Image (cartoon, helix red, strand yellow):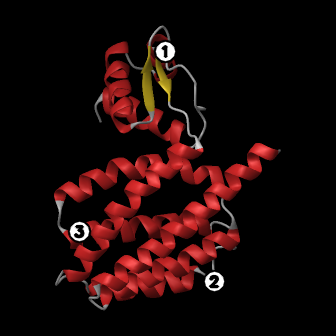
Amino acid sequence: MRASDKAYESLRTDIVEWRIAPGTVLAEVEQSERLGVSRTPVREALGRLVADGLAVQQRGRGTVVSEVSDDHVEDLFVLRVALECASAKEAARSTHRESFAELAGRFDAAAHEVKSPGSREAYYQLTQLLDDSIDEAANNKYLSSALRTLRVNLQRVRRMAKDNPRRLKESAREHAAIARAIASGNPEVASAATIVHLHQSLTHIMAHSAGSERQ
């Protein structure tokens, strides 16, 4: 792995996992020392983080981790609805839908397992598999590229709502409905199931965000 890729992956993970908080200045010298690489790879990594929307350039401060506000979350979900509904529809029209019935079954099983130790990371891996499968079935490189960038920001937003077992159980059932609709080859039902899931996800995140502000 190139030094710039290593720096990028490390910084991106720290930002997404909230180990580096919004508003933190990402100084080149400090980060190069922390990551054990020279300043040039760090500079390249910071440029990629800005392109992702995880950081911004501020006059007099340099590169700063971007803030996550309620408006930011809502804007992300407006784009998410448009892109994921389009992708689900295209996947449902594909002739390569064999894996989605199995995925629906795995999400049904996951709905009963999310409370057990170690199950949540496995669940997130399953949702990543569904995303990848939809991207592959949709077979639209522009949609896939836009969704990849969007999902990086969504991973950070998801951490705002923590890992609520009840919500994860509901989410598993919603994902099962999406997978089942795609497997049946019904674009409109796949889109509707995606809208239901995204509405529920946004409602949960915003409720948690509001609760945090009152504390």
Q: CA distance from mark 2 to mark 1?
A: 45 Å
Of the residues shown, which amino acid type is indicated by label 1? Answer: Ala
- Between disc 3 and disc 2, whose residue precedes? 2
Query: With respect to residue 59, does 89 lie above or below?
Result: below
**Do tag 1 and tag 3 residues touch (Cβ < 8 Å)?**
no
Q: Which residue is mark 1?
A: 27
Q: Position of residue 29 (x, y in %)?
A: 46, 11
Q: Is residue 162 visible?
A: no
Q: Is residue 65 visible?
A: yes
Image quadrant where residue 177 sits: bottom left
Q: Is residue 83 left or right of residue 194?
A: left
- Between disc 1 and disc 3, whose residue precedes? 1
**Do tag 2 and tag 1 residues touch (Cβ < 8 Å)?**
no
In the rendered image, which quarter contains the C terminus?
Answer: top right
Mark 2 lies on a secondary structure that is: loop
Q: Which residue is mark 2?
A: 112
Q: In the displayed orientation, state which residue is furthest to the bottom.
A: 184
Residue at (20%, 82%) from the top-left corner?
A: 93
Pick whichever, 12 or 167, lies toward us.
Answer: 167
Of the residues shown, which amino acid type is indicated by label 3? Answer: Glu
Q: Is residue 102 left or right of residue 30?
A: left
Of the residues shown, which amino acid type is indicated by label 2? Answer: His
Q: In the displayed orientation, state which residue is furthest to the right.
A: 215
Q: Which residue is mark 3?
A: 136
Pick whichever, 35 or 180, lies toward us.
Answer: 180
Q: Position of residue 51 (x, y in %)?
A: 33, 33
Q: Position of residue 151 (x, y in %)?
A: 41, 53
